[in-house]
Image: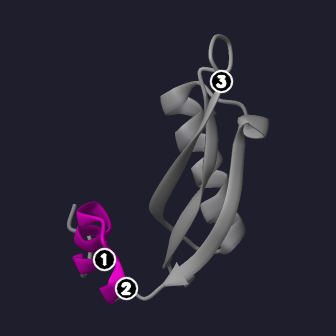
Amino acid sequence: MTQVKVYRISGEMLISHDHFPKWQKFNLELTGTSEKDAINKTYSLLGSKHKLRRFHIKINKVEEVANKEAVSKNIQDLLAIDRWNI
């Protein structure tokens, strides 16, 4: 079974590329099986929320974070789940 890890991703995204373009910083914590998976999730989330294309997103830093160091409440709750009951 594949181990799920927590990644902290920081970078910049181009907001209002049509009218008054401005690069805005972002920080995300995401779960993924690999660094590549976390980067693809970042592109997907920012693209769907802010209507950005991949070339409007610059990822500066990707680092693996220990499970106990995760700041996001959603990530902490996901990691606390022991097993799924259906």
The label number, if any, that marks residue 67 in the structure image:
2
The percent coordinates of residue 67 (x first, y second) are 37, 85
Residue 59 to residue 47: above or below: below
In this rendering, would 35 be left or right of 51? Answer: right
Precedes in sequence: disc 2 or disc 3: 3
Range shown magenta: 68-81
The answer to which quarter of the image holds residue 62 is: bottom right
Element assignment for label 2:
helix
Give x and y (percent) for residue 71: 30, 72
Q: Which residue is mark 3?
A: 21
Q: Which residue is mark 1?
A: 79
Name the amino acid type tagged 3.
Answer: Pro
Contact check, label 3 and label 1, Cβ < 8 Å: no
Q: CA distance from mark 2 to mark 1?
A: 7 Å
At 22% from the left and 61% from the top, the residue drawn is 86
Residue type at tag 1: Leu
Does the stretch in magenta take in 70? yes
Does residue 16 appear to the left or right of 79 in the view shown? right
